[in-house]
Structure formats: C-alpha cells, structure tokens
Amino acid sequence: MRRRNRGHPVNGKSMMTIGCHLSVARGFLAMGRDALAIDATTFQFFTRNPRGSKAKAIDPADIAAFLELAAEHRFAPLLAHAPYTLNPCSADPKTREFALETMRDDLARLELLPGNLYNFHPGSHVGQGEAAGIALITAQLNAILTPHQTTTVLLETMAGKGSEVGRSFQELRAILDGVVLRDKMGVCLDTCHVHDAGYDIVDDLDGVLAEFDAVIGLDRLRAVHLNDSLNPRGSRKDRHARIGHGRIGLAAITRIINHPCLRHLPFLLETPNELPGYAAEIALLRGVYQG
Ligand code: FE
Ligand code: FE
Ligand code: ZN
C-alpha cells in the first residue's frame, strides 16, 4: 500500500499522481467516478462537514463499490482532510477535547478504507505561545494514534495566519519529535501555505527542499497540496489561487511537480474551481509533467 503513491510506470514512463478536493456529499463511489472523469488518480475529501461535527453514516456498499473501482483503475492513496475548524491546541480544554474526539472518530472510520492518508491543521495557539501549542498538539497525537492503524496522519504546512502553528518546518519537526508512534506520521506540503509563510519556492525551490530535508526529512513528505497563491511571499494570508493565476505562477509550479524530490508524490489541487476547472488544471499539469 505504501508504495502505491510512487507513481505507476506505464510503458517505462512514470505517471503523475494527481487529483483534487471533491465533495463527499454523494459518497465514495461518486467521488471515484468524478475523479476518473477528470483524469485524476486520487482525490481529497473532508471527513465531515468542516463547520459541523456530525459525520455521515458509512454505507458499506458504497465503500465496497468504491474499492472495486479504485483497484480497477489503480487509484493512489486518498487524502482525507480533517475539518479545518478543529483546534487541537486551543486554550479551551473543551475545544481541545472536541478536536481529539473528532480526529479519533475519523481515524476509526478511515480503517474501512485502509492504507490512506489523513491530513490536519496543527491549529492555532491563540496567544499561549508556539511551545505550548506544540506540546498540546503532540499530546493529542499521542492520545489518538494506535499501533495497528493503517492510516498515515499528516501535519499540513501552514501559512502562519494569526497564531497558526506549523508555518515553519522547525515547528512541524518539534511536533513530530514528541510523537511516540512517529512511523504513523508524515507531512503534507501546501504550496500556497509555504509561499505565504515566506519560503521561496518560486526562485529557490532547491533551497527550500534542502531545508525541509535538513529539518524534517524528505522521507516524511507524503503529499503536496498544489495551489497558487493570491498574495506575495511572506504575506501569511492563505488565499488560494488557480494554477498559473497567482503569485507562484505556472513556471514555478511546473518545476515543483517535476522536481526529483517531489515528482513521485500525490498532488492534490485545492484551487477555487468546480469540476470542469479541475479537469482543465489536471490536463494542464499532466501536459507539463515530464514522464
Ligand atoms: Fe488544509
Ligand atoms: Fe492545503
Ligand atoms: Zn489553505
């Protein structure tokens, strides 16, 4: 399962693993079919309504039908995304408890789709300071990770809006350092977020990846959120733009998807698009991917 995201060689060429964020409203088989229709081999979905707390009841027939489709079409692992409203490092114990119970429930449910990825935002320390935030996030992960889970939990690189934890590679490393079951953990790099956090992925991608490797280790990098950014580098804003329509630009994004350290990873689009827009972006990106 782990190796599936290495890209499938077809006729000696490596295929790009790419997909986008899809609505979970109509179930897994519908997402799988939408993915196929736009030439995607993976997709991202919210585990539940990002604003609410209730997860939809799981339909075993839908899961079984999706798994059959995914096997037939050799889908790469999926990226489940935790509700972005959770704050695992809130100052309020009730808010932390809610994040913990939600993530624990998500991980239990994800075992029905074994071997996938679960991405979450580390949270905002809301004035407690980075060190306190990091300690709370680590404690939460130690409370929910289990030795037999097949899901890899990913920390997302953040833009640094407000008091967001995870805008620097050092902060993510500090979280990982405190996790006991570290082999269950990885990182998802969001191109808009790292750009907004100040990393120069436009003119110094090699340097940024060398820093990632030195601080976290590139072996921990398991997925890329591929987004352009509306704002300049270091703005700490987190406003996604369509590919080629932001401050990162198509030339830099082309270098990102072809970089030897990144090209085997799953790329997930979270650009402001409906399905036809995603189809066009996937076609554009497959066109500039050097198989
Ligand atoms: Fe996210
Ligand atoms: Fe993201
Ligand atoms: Zn974002």
Image: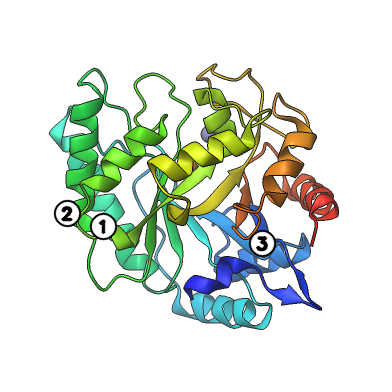
Crowding near the residue tagged with mark 3, few <14, some 14–19, many ≥20 C-alpha atoms within 10 Å: many
Q: Nearer the viewer, mark 1 or mark 3?
A: 3
Q: Is residue 278 above or below residue 234?
A: below
Residue 236 visible in the displayed image: yes
Q: Is residue 19 above or below residue 234?
A: below
- Give the residue at mark 3: 17
Q: Residue at x 30, y 66 (%)?
A: 108
Element type at mark 3: loop
**Alpha-carbon span between mark 2 and mark 1:** 9 Å
The three-letter code of the residue at mark 3 reads Thr
Q: Nearer the viewer, mark 2 or mark 3?
A: 3
Q: Is residue 149 left or right of residue 198?
A: left
Q: Position of residue 162 (x, y in %)?
A: 39, 18
Q: Residue at x 56, y 72 (%)?
A: 4
- Contact between marks 1 and 3 (CB within 8 A): the answer is no
- Mark 1 CB lies closer than 8 A to ligand 1: no
**Quarter of the rendering containing residue 15:** bottom right
Q: Position of residue 73 (x, y in %)?
A: 69, 78
Q: Position of residue 290 (x, y in %)?
A: 80, 57
- Give the residue at mark 2: 143
Residue 47 visible in the displayed image: no
**Residue 104 circle label:** 1
- Contact between marks 2 and 3 (CB within 8 A): the answer is no
Element type at mark 2: helix
